[in-house]
Image (cartoon, rainbow, N blue to C red):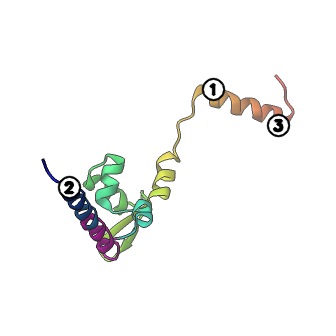
Amino acid sequence: MENPFEIINERLERIENLLENIYSNIGTKETNIITSKIMDIEQLSNYLGLSKSQIYKLTSSHTIPHSKRGKRLYFDKETINSWVLENKIWTQDDIEKQASDYLIKKGKHF
């Protein structure tokens, strides 16, 4: 049977190594806050389920909101979410409620 102190030491060494890797990567990688808000074309492709060529077509026709830094394209996640939802298809109930609200507002009751 192994010595329990050796097992504890091995686990502590693994934890220390993991922490060292995490701390060493903080300076070289973008923080989670930035990466969760900004996407590159690969991330956007996965996020929207579109091919890269479709995204390139949307950017070249200025259909999809994007930023360009040199040759790289960047997409703001919140802006993309708004863009995706801006052409909402209204349900029949939504349309009837809007019509009813409009008639009430104009003073014409039915």
**SS type, badge 2:** helix
Residue depicted at x 60% and y 26%: 92
Q: Nearer the viewer, mark 3 or mark 1?
A: 1
How far from the left and from the top, in percent, is residue 96?
Answer: 67, 27
- Residue extending farthest to the left is 1
Residue depicted at x 28% and y 62%: 15
State yes or no: residue 5 in magenta: no
Give amino acid for label 3: Lys
Q: Residues within 10 Å of mark 1 (few under 14, many from 20)?
A: few
Q: Quadrant of residue 90?
A: top right
Whether residue 22 is situated above or below residue 77 in the rendered picture: below
How far from the left and from the top, in percent, is residue 65?
Answer: 44, 61
Whether residue 68 is situated above or below residue 12 in the rendered picture: below
Q: Nearer the viewer, mark 2 or mark 3?
A: 2
User: Label 2 belongs to which residue?
Assistant: 7
Q: Nearer the viewer, mark 2 or mark 1?
A: 2
User: What segment carries the magenta color?
Assistant: 17-29
Left-right relation of 16 to 89: left
**SS type, badge 1:** helix
How far from the left and from the top, in percent, is residue 12?
Answer: 26, 62
Residue depicted at x 30% and y 71%: 25
Say which label, 3 or 1, has the lower sequence index. Answer: 1
**SS type, badge 3:** helix
